[in-house]
Amino acid sequence: MAQTGSPSDRHANRPLSPHLQVYRLTFTFLMSGFHRVTGVLLYFGIVIFVWWLVAAASSPAYFDFVNALFGSWFGRLVLLGMTWLTIHHALGGIRHFIWDTGYGLDERERELLARLTLIGSAALTLLVWILAYLLRGG
Amino acid sequence: MSMRTPLGRVRGLGSAKDGTGHFWLQRLTSIASLVLTIFAIALAISLVGEPHAVVAARLGSPFIAVALLATIFAYAYHMQLGMQVIIEDYVQGELARVLAFAGNIFFCFAVALFSAFAVLKLGFGG
């Protein structure tokens, strides 16, 4: 068939493949999306750690200021969130490694892996913070 | 002139024209990040509540500084690869895509350079 119109017209007339809205919402679907969401949040959240490193390299006074900010209740809340995002994304990554080998793709297995990722990330985050409070006295 | 057929030249390259390079580096940087994150969390716990002098000395000690540099590099590379896929999925229009790809690379470089400078400064004597 001869092509008509400008390249952009042809582009606009292409049929689109079905996107998110046509699929039934499932737990594994949400967890897959959440892996990406945690990745984006960590992408921007890493600025917090860059800031802390730069503060440590700047001066004792500036470091004390940033450390006090991080030690406030709001700072701790943000760091708790970052801990959970980091561990959740890490466990999600391990899930992807299991899938890369061709295992864990059955319906029951993938449900289990998704559940383990969520429960595991919450448990490990609590463990890290309990360890920090126990070893360092808050 | 190449003796390879057109099909032979493109086979295995995929739509981004860089073959499995992206996939492989995504996995490589995630394995590195996984191991280095365990180190970073342990380091963070060890530094809770410590004064500046202790923090600066520990971050600047050779093994910890090098491990931190590796962490920063693995994270920044992994971030660049991950965000690129997201841009490929959601950003439409040639110009917007190119700008987003460039912005992504600049941001990840800035993260890596600021962190690396801070760690090296501490390592070379504050």
Image: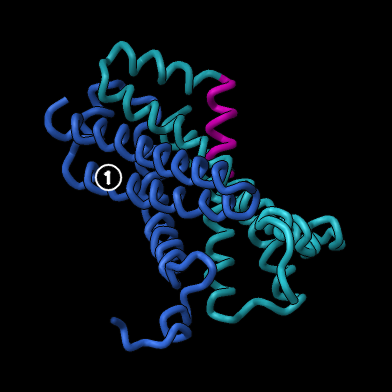
Residue B28 sits above or below residue B41 on the image: below
Boundaries of the magenta span: A73-85
Residue A28 sits above or below residue B125 on the image: below
What residue is drawn where x is 38% and y is 36%?
B111
What residue is drawn where x is 46% and y is 68%?
B17
What residue is drawn where x is 45% and y is 83%?
B6
Which quarter of the rendering shows the N terminus of chain A? bottom right
Residue A3 falls inside the magenta stretch: no
User: Which chain's residue wears label 1?
Assistant: B
Q: Tell me residue A56's x, y (percent).
A: 30, 24
Figure colour scheme: by chain
- Residue in front for this viewpoint, A16 or B69: A16
Residue A132 sits above or below residue B5 on the image: above
Q: Tell me residue B52's x, y (percent).
A: 28, 21
Left or right position of A47 against B92: left
Left or right position of A101 against A109: left
What residue is drawn where x is 56% and y is 48%?
B94
Instruction: Look at the image and tell me whether residue B109 can be seen.
Output: yes
- Residue in front for this viewpoint, B20 or A113: B20
The secondary element bearing badge 1 is classed as helix
Q: Give the main secondary structure of the magenta stretch.
A: helix
Query: Looking at the colours in the rendered structure, which chain would you say is drawn in cyan?
Result: A
Q: Tell me residue A15's x, y (percent).
A: 79, 64
Q: Tell me residue A86's x, y (percent).
A: 52, 46
Answer with the quarter of the image where residue B119 lies.
top left
Query: Looking at the colours in the rendered structure, which chain would you say is drawn in blue?
Result: B
Q: Amino acid at mark 1?
A: Leu
Residue where numbered disc 1 is placed: B69
As drawn, the residue found furthest toward the top would be A61
Counting other residues with Cα less than 10 Å from the Cα at mark 1, is it few (<14), some (14-19), or many (20 or more)? many
Residue A84 falls inside the magenta stretch: yes
- Residue in front for this viewpoint, B54 or A51: A51
